[in-house]
Image (cartoon, rainbow, N blue to C red):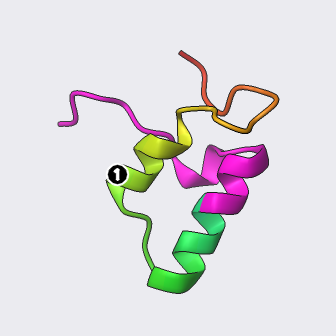
Amino acid sequence: MSRIQTIDPKQATGKAKDLLNGVQAKLGMTPKNLQLISLSGHGNSTPVAKP
């Protein structure tokens, strides 16, 4: 069980979705650390996950 809840790539929006889709396309998977980074909101105009 994770202590920090990450975003499900299927529920991502905006730039986070673009980031996670690109990683998925290149690696065939989405590592948890990149799911966590996508929560930061840097460069996003709207939140990518609900608190």
Q: Is residue 33 left or right of residue 15?
A: left
The residue lying furthest to the left in this view is 1
Along the viewing direction, whichever of 40 and 49 lies nearer the viewer: 40
Q: Is residue 15 left or right of residue 36?
A: right
Q: Residue at x 42, y 38 (%)?
A: 6
Q: Quadrant of residue 4?
A: top left
Please provide percent x and percent y for residue 23: 54, 71
Q: Specify the amino acid type for callout 1.
A: Asn
The relative height of residue 41 versus residue 34 in the rendered view (above or below) is above
Relative height, residue 36 to residue 27 (above, below): above
Bounds of the magenta span? Answer: 1-19
Which residue in the rendered view is the most extreme toward the front? Answer: 43
Q: Residue furthest top?
A: 51
Q: Is residue 3 shown in magenta?
A: yes
Give the left or right position of residue 1, taking residue 24 as reference.
Answer: left
**Residue at disc 1, secondary structure:** helix
Residue visible at 61% across and 29% down in the picture = 49
Residue 24, given in percent of the width and then of the height, sits at 54, 74
- Across and down, in percent, residue 1 comes to 17, 36
Left or right of residue 18: residue 23? left
Residue appearing at x 75%, y 36% in the figure: 44
Give the labeled residue for mark 1: 33
